[in-house]
Structure formats: C-alpha cells, structure tokens
Image: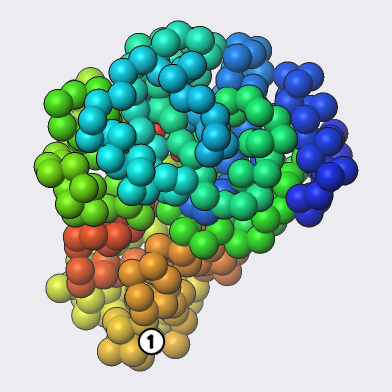
Amino acid sequence: MNTKISEIDESSLKLSKEIIEDGGAVAFPTETVYGLGANAFNTAAVENIFKIKGRPNDNPLIVHVHKDYDLSALVDFVPDYAVKLAKAFLPGPLTMVYKSKGKVSPAVSCGLETLAVRIPSHEGAQRFLKYLNLPIAAPSANVSKHVSPTAAEHVFYDLNGKIELILNGGKCSGGIESTVLDCTGEAPVVLRSGLITREMIEKVAGSCAEYVYKEGAAARSPGMKYKHYSPACRTSLYAYEERFAALAEYKSERGRGVKAFILCDNQTATELKAEYVLNLGSTENEIAANLYSKLREGEGMADYIIAIAPEKQNGVMAGVMNRLKKACGSNL
Ligand code: AMP
Ligand code: MG
C-alpha cells in the first residue's frame, strides 16, 4: 500500500471519507498529537487500528467528535461538573470518560462500560470530523510503544505502507496527549495528565483528584500499565537535583566514544554547557510541544539519550514528567 501525505482540502477530505466509510483508517492532526482514526461504529475497522499499531487489545481508544456533535447519543450521564468543564475547556486537549450508551463498537473501549470522548480544537481535525460526521475512534498514529507523532512525517516514518492517507496539519502545537479525565464519579479524577492540568480542572470543578497507578493493580485507565513513548536508543532519566551526575555520565559515555546526548530544558542546558544537547526550550508549553519531536530527533542520531527532569513538577510539567518516565522506563 502506498501512503500519501496530503494537505487538508476538499479532495483529501473526500478521499478520507471514502476510506473511513469503507472500514479503513486515516491519520489526522490534532492540537496534541496525530491520531489514527476509524469509524467507531465499525468493529472490524476499530480492530484494524489495534492491528496496524500493534496495540495491546485491552488498551481502549478515545472517540473524537466535532464540536456540534450530539454527545448524548453516545454517552449516558453527564454530571454538572462535566458540563462546566466542557464549557471551560472544549474544544481542546481534554478527554472526558463517561458511561457509554453502548452505541459505538465494544472494541473501542475494549469491553469497558465507559467511553472516552474528545473534541479537538485543531482546525484541521474539526474539518475532518465535521466532514465525516461520525464518531472517530483514534489512538495516537504511531507504532505502539514508540514515541507519539507530532508531525505528519513522524506518522509516515512509523506507518508508511500500513495506511493509505495522512492528513497533514503541520506540527502539533500541544505536543503531549490529552488529559484523560474520569467523569463517572462525584468528582473528576485525572487518569492521564496533559495540557489541561489538574490545577485548571480544580478551579472550575471545585475539586479534582489524580489517580496513581500501582504496578500490578487493575488499572482504571488500562493504558497506564504499558511502556510508552520510547525512542529506539538507550535512555535514562535523572532528577533535576541529579543534573551534575547526568553531566558526568554524559562525559564518561562520550569519553568511551558513545554518541550520548543530554535532553533537557533551556535553563539546564545553559547551566551545564554540554556540546550535544536536545534542547526542549524554555516555557512549559514549549517543553511539552518539543518533547516528542526531540525524542525522535534524538533516536536518529544518538546511541544514548540522558534526560534530565525539569525543576518544576506540577502543572503542565506533571504531564511532561509522566511521558519522560515512560519513555525512559524510569520509576523516578
Ligand atoms: P492513546 O490513544 O494512545 O492516547 O491512549 C488513550 C488513553 O485513554 C489510554 O491511556 C487509555 O487507557 C485511555 N482511555 C481510553 N478509553 C478509556 C476509558 N473508557 N476509561 C479509561 N481510560 C480510557
Ligand atoms: Mg498513544
């Protein structure tokens, strides 16, 4: 199969509709990462997404809809706080988990009674979803466990020959996956941190808890228990306080001829003055937006990526830390 990358226009939208209605998959941009979408009503199409990615079959998908889609057709119960949160943050990088009405294929939620729903703000994503007017089940458009794609070329690198069409909407501005929020209980619970932070949710909803997955326990959001976001080379993660130990490790590896690179924010890069650096930038939003593209850039030239955590750990950095730990297989 030839994989085509197209700008989003009438002709590529028409082709994407044909592919999706025929039970196929199309990659499309969102403000977080690129998604690999299929018709959520079609079980074979949804199962195919798992196959294309090599995704474990107990890790449920998020359904994406356009901003005028009638969500009450898909989910059952929308608590007051969820209405407030939707008003404050949607369309945007927030996925809300509700009780499912069982209208989409059970393959989407891997048999769970809940459904994760997202309304992306990316203009290209909205056009695509509006054109189809279907709920689109979509995980990130990468091979399972690899770094998530934040540009059309990243999708092509992972899925060339496996899908027909990639809609090109440029570089994703957000850069890390959406916040996943459980809205089935009396108060919201963050299942996966992202750009809509726990602190932002708390301000609107009054309270907001954060679910912490414990190794071996039944995961409330099954994606948590898997290794994720990993570049193809060796990695390690150092705490901010250990940054000089990271520098020593970098120097010792370089001394042995290993192509080691330090991955860190601009503040740490300036302080450490290492020659080979994957610089994530200065602001929280820059760091999130650059994280995956720098991991991909790094795996193309490094034998070993030595990541250093940012000093700040809350807000958007909670989401960045979650991804860094998973990318580096670290329990830091
Ligand atoms: P990805 O599509 O790779 O961004 O992953 C989707 C994330 O959403 C995973 O972490 C899933 O575990 C989570 N998720 C999807 N559906 C549900 C659901 N019904 N309940 C809880 N978590 C979900
Ligand atoms: Mg993913």
Residue 226 seen in this snapshot: no
Q: Quadrant of ligand 1?
A: top left
Q: Position of residue 243 (x, y in %)?
A: 23, 76
Q: Position of residue 11 (x, y in %)?
A: 87, 43
Quadrant the C terminus occupies: bottom left
Quadrant the N terminus occupies: top right
Label 1 beta carbon less than 8 Å to ligand 2: no
Q: Nearer the viewer, residue 139 or 127?
A: 127
Residue 166 seen in this snapshot: yes
Which residue is at 44% across, 20% downward?
Answer: 72
Looking at the image, residue 318 lies above or below residue 223 = below
Which residue is at 19% across, 24% downward?
Answer: 185
- Secondary structure of the residue carrying tag 1 is loop
- Tell me: 244 left or right of 327: left
Which residue is at 73% across, 45% downward?
Answer: 166
Q: How is the image coloured?
A: rainbow
Which residue is at 51% across, 10% downward?
Answer: 103
Q: Specify the quadrant of the image occupied by residue 97.
A: top left
Looking at the image, residue 308 lies above or below residue 158 = below
- Tell me: 42 left or right of 103: right
Q: Position of residue 25 (x, y in %)?
A: 70, 30
Q: Position of residue 202 (x, y in %)?
A: 17, 48
- Tell me: 10 left or right of 23: right
Q: Which residue in the structure is indicated by mark 1?
A: 274
Residue type (three-letter) at the residue carrying disc 1: Ala
Q: Nearer the viewer, residue 233 or 162?
A: 162
Q: How many marks?
A: 1
Q: Specify the quadrant of the image occupied by residue 37.
A: top right
Within 10 Å of disc 1 (Cα), the crowding (few <14, some 14-19, many 20+) is: some
Looking at the image, residue 148 lies above or below residue 238 = above
